[in-house]
Amino acid sequence: MMTRLIPKVFYDTLAEGLDLFVGGLGFKVLYQDDDLAVVERDVAKAYIVASPEFAAKDRPEISIETDDIDGLYAEISQRRPELLHPNCRTV
């Protein structure tokens, strides 16, 4: 039985991916080495991989499912408002 699908997301540098997932979305780092980080928040998990070659080829679309969109919006608005779309409503 499958219980979870874990995306692998490529970035030029690991710092770029960690900036979004940890700094912006509030994930925590479960594991990190020179080229890979495993991040998790609640039951969501992702593998962040440093690979300039694959980062140039791969442009994933990532959707977030939440049961508290207003709370998540408020949290990101406070932490990193520049991540929100400029036409987004305000709280």
Image (cartoon, rainbow, N blue to C red):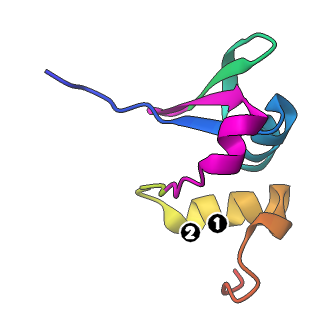
Q: Residue at x 20, y 25 (%)?
A: 2
Left or right, 29 with respect to 79, comes to left
| Nearest to the observer: residue 51 or residue 27 | 51
Q: Quadrant of residue 59?
A: bottom right
Q: Which residue is mark 1?
A: 73
Three-letter amino acid code at the position of disc 1:
Tyr
Q: Residue at x 69, y 21 (%)?
A: 37
Q: Is residue 50 visible?
A: yes
Q: Nearer the viewer, residue 73 or 86?
A: 86
Q: CA distance from mark 2 to mark 1?
A: 5 Å
The part of the chain drawn in magenta is: 41-62
- Do the residues bearing badges 2 and 1 touch, measured as CB atoms within 8 Å? yes
Depth check: give the residue in front, 7 or 83: 7
Say above or below: 53 vs 32.
below
For the N terminus, give its image quadrant. top left
Camera-nearest residue between 30 and 48: 48
Disc 2 residue type (three-letter): Asp
- Secondary structure found at label 2: helix
Task: Identify the residue at horizontal 48%, vertical 55% (top origin).
Answer: 64
Q: Residues within 10 Å of mark 1 (few under 14, many from 20)?
A: some
